[in-house]
Image (cartoon, grey):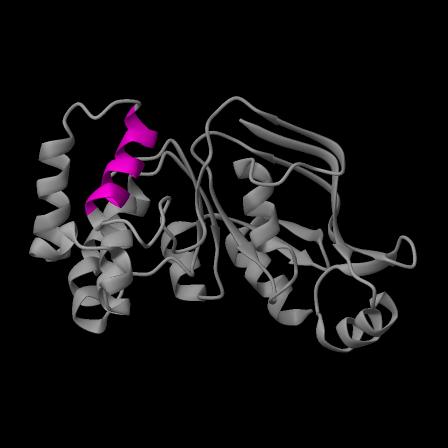
């Protein structure tokens, strides 16, 4: 379903201060290595020579410290990033749920945000009224749905995003654990919906630091270190490898 062959990704940084940048980043970044291109360009090698196949129906955990390449891998398979070299083959749509953000400006209303995502998923607004009612019932936003998102509290923003994203089933889901449900009271309400949402994904690629979550939803583990896959195998063995190394 998804196959990566000798895939690498370099992310260029354009700055007049590459020498200072290099010294600072080398002291702080735990992920991809830096490569000096010129006096004004430095590249971060976010992924390096990745070879991996993910089959239909697999539940794959991405394991590794911050900056090891997990989120970049999700963006590559989702088509957000294109590789610098190597090849990626896909015969399925991969839907990313990586960052908590809207398709529209926060100057616009929650109604517009919900309609935009519905239109992107379905190609038309047919059936939107029923969908909107479901969003209102679960999120509890009420009349706030008609106000600009910038007037919402952080909890309201989280509730709306969570409800919109979990209102659909995905054939292949690229999921980051940063995906959340908002305020504490709503999080409790959303726990069962979260499990049902992930269970209904046909194929799952899940980046998380939570071992209980990975054990709950995944069977296979990919361990990342400095932009490379250093272990690929059953989840329990992958977690043991990561802890030992």
Q: Position of residue 10 (x, y in %)?
A: 76, 48
Asked whether 115 falls inside the magenta stretch, the response is yes
Circle count: 0
Q: Is 141 positioned to the left or the right of 240 in the image?
A: left
> Who is closer to the viewer here, 164 or 64?
164
Tell me if I can see residue 43 in this picture.
yes
Q: Residue at x 62, y 56 (%)?
A: 223
Q: Is residue 91 above or below residue 173?
A: above
Q: Position of residue 120 (x, y in %)?
A: 34, 31
Asked whether 86 falls inside the magenta stretch, the response is no
Q: Residue at x 46, y 37 (%)?
A: 58
Q: Is residue 193 above or below residue 114?
A: below
| Residue 96 location, quadrant | top left
Q: Position of residue 128 (x, y in %)?
A: 16, 31
Q: Is 116 positioned to the left or the right of 234 in the image?
A: left
Tell me if I can see residue 194 in this picture.
no
Q: Is 15 positioned to the left or the right of 72 in the image?
A: right
Q: Residue at x 61, y 67 (%)?
A: 65
Q: Quadrant of the C terminus?
A: bottom right
Q: Is residue 33 above or below residue 112?
A: below
* Magenta stretch, residue numbers: 111-122
| Residue 226 location, quadrant | bottom right
Q: Is residue 173 above or below residue 119?
A: below
> Who is closer to the viewer here, 175 or 203?
175
Q: Residue furthest right?
A: 38
Q: Position of residue 205 (x, y in %)?
A: 48, 45
> Who is closer to the viewer here, 192 or 133?
133
Magenta: main secondary structure: helix
Q: Is 192 positioned to the left or the right of 120 in the image?
A: left
> Who is closer to the viewer here, 62 or 163?
163
């Amino acid at each position: 379903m998804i196959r990566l062959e000798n895939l690498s990704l370099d992310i260029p940084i354009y700055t007049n201060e590459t020498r200072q940048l290099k010294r600072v980043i080398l002291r702080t970044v735990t992920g991809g290595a830096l490569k000096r291109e010129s006096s004004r360009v430095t590249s971060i090698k976010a992924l390096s020579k990745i070879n991996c196949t993910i089959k239909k129906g697999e539940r794959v955990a991405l394991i590794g410290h911050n900056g090891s390449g997990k989120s970049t891998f999700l963006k590559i398979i989702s088509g957000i990033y294109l590789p610098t070299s190597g090849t990626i083959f896909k015969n399925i749509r991969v839907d990313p749920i990586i960052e908590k953000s809207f398709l529209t400006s926060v100057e616009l209303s929650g109604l517009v945000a919900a309609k935009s995502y519905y239109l992107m998923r379905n190609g038309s607004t047919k059936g939107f009224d029923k969908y909107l009612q479901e969003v209102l019932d679960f999120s509890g936003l009420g009349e706030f749905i008609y106000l600009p998102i910038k007037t919402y509290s952080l909890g309201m923003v989280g509730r709306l995003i969570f409800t919109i994203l979990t209102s659909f089933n995905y054939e292949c889901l690229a999921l980051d654990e940063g995906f959340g449900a908002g305020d504490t009271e709503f999080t409790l309400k959303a726990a069962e919906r979260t499990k049902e949402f992930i269970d209904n994904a046909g194929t799952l690629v899940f980046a998380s630091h939570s071992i209980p979550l990975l054990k709950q939803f995944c069977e296979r583990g990919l361990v990342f270190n400095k932009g490379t896959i250093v272990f690929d195998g059953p989840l329990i063995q992958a977690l043991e490898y990561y802890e030992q190394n």
